[in-house]
Image: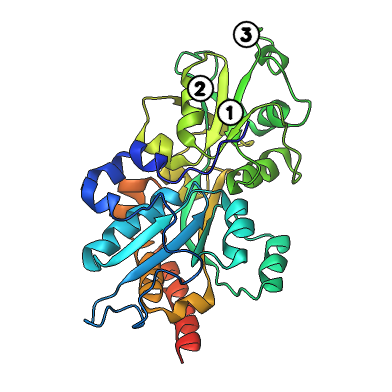
Amino acid sequence: MTDKPDFVSRRKFITAAAGASALGIAGCVSESGSGGEGGDGTNTDGGNGGSGELSGTVEIAGSSTVFPLAEAVSVEFRKEHPNVEFNIRSTGSGGGFSDFFCQDKTHFNNASRPMKESEKQLCEDAGVEWLELNVATDALTVVVNNEADWVDCVTIDELKQIWEPNGATKWSDVRDDWPDEEFELYGAASTSGTFDYFTEAVIGEAGSHRQDYTATEKDRSIVQGVTGSKNAMGYFGFSYYYNNPEAVKAVKIDNGDGCIEPSLETAKSGKYTPLARPLFTYPKKSALKEPHVAEFAKFFVEKSADQEIVANQVGYVPNTEEDMQEQLDQLTAAIEEVQG
């Protein structure tokens, strides 16, 4: 099955976001979708409320993996600009592009993989221009039940055997000394960038992921499934595991150079291959005309190098100062272009 888009559930289960004040977060993320399409929800005085303060609504959709980072950054932004509201939807990277961003309904689309050619064409056909900004690095994490004491490390080939179409049905199909028990599998929905990245990195061909598994955009649902069965396996972005390390067991990955655990350090060093991946946000160029949108875009990029927010709170690898400045230079040039 595939769950409906998750607007706020990740917030409730990520301890870093919970560390912010409840009132601050509640004012930051809207479940109602207020603000309408594109720039709607922005004051007619150009987004400054006539008082020199920024105001308006920032509309964001896309990746469930980038969701907690966008949320954490928006909480910090509202400390400086309390009149700016945020509507952040967790729709999956692909769902965000096709249903919101390329339909001119949002200012940003978060993505856990680069924009596809088909998505670029969809946006171009709708007259939507974009900018690609790298905001962090993730260590996509494979997890099993805490009682699955027979498995601590898997090879990429073994993961392929499990997750490819018509793949292994029992643990013993992969290794003889594993239990003669059927897998219970939980993973990302096909609209998710995590699904796309995992499929290509592990199985090697786009769209070649098995279909007989529980598909969802909610990491909580994956964890619930894995904790509920000793024979379960799932995968999702590192942030949820980072903030809930006792709930499930992360499996080490052997890509030919030994077993490597998912961590900030192994993702940053490049050892955690092929499941370390860049994370993106895509601002709509025309939306950068709005002061509150442009300022948030710059703030997001600046905070991408913030160790406290990106690593300590959310659980991703921050950009280097050099990489952050390169992204900021591109963004500043785009803002100057549209604002004249």
Question: Most extreme residue toward the top, as rendered?
Answer: 180
Q: Does residue 2 show up?
A: yes
State the residue position of label 1: 186
The image's mark for residue 179 is 3
Alpha carbons under labels 3 and 2: distance apart: 16 Å
Foreground residue among 104 and 304: 104
Query: Callout 3: 10 Å neighbours few (<14), some, many (20+)?
Result: some
Q: Quadrant of residue 74?
A: bottom left
Residue 146, image x, y percentages: 44, 18
State the residue position of label 2: 226
The answer to whether residue 49 is left or right of residue 320 is left
The numbered mark, 3 or 2, whose residue comes first in the sequence reads: 3
Alpha carbons under labels 3 and 1: distance apart: 19 Å
Residue 179, image x, y percentages: 62, 8
Query: Which element type, helix, strand or loop, lies under badge 1?
Result: strand
Residue at 73%, 61% in the rendered image: 118
> As displayed, is residue 248 above or below residue 289?
above
Query: Callout 1: 10 Å neighbours few (<14), some, many (20+)?
Result: many
Residue 14, image x, y percentages: 35, 39
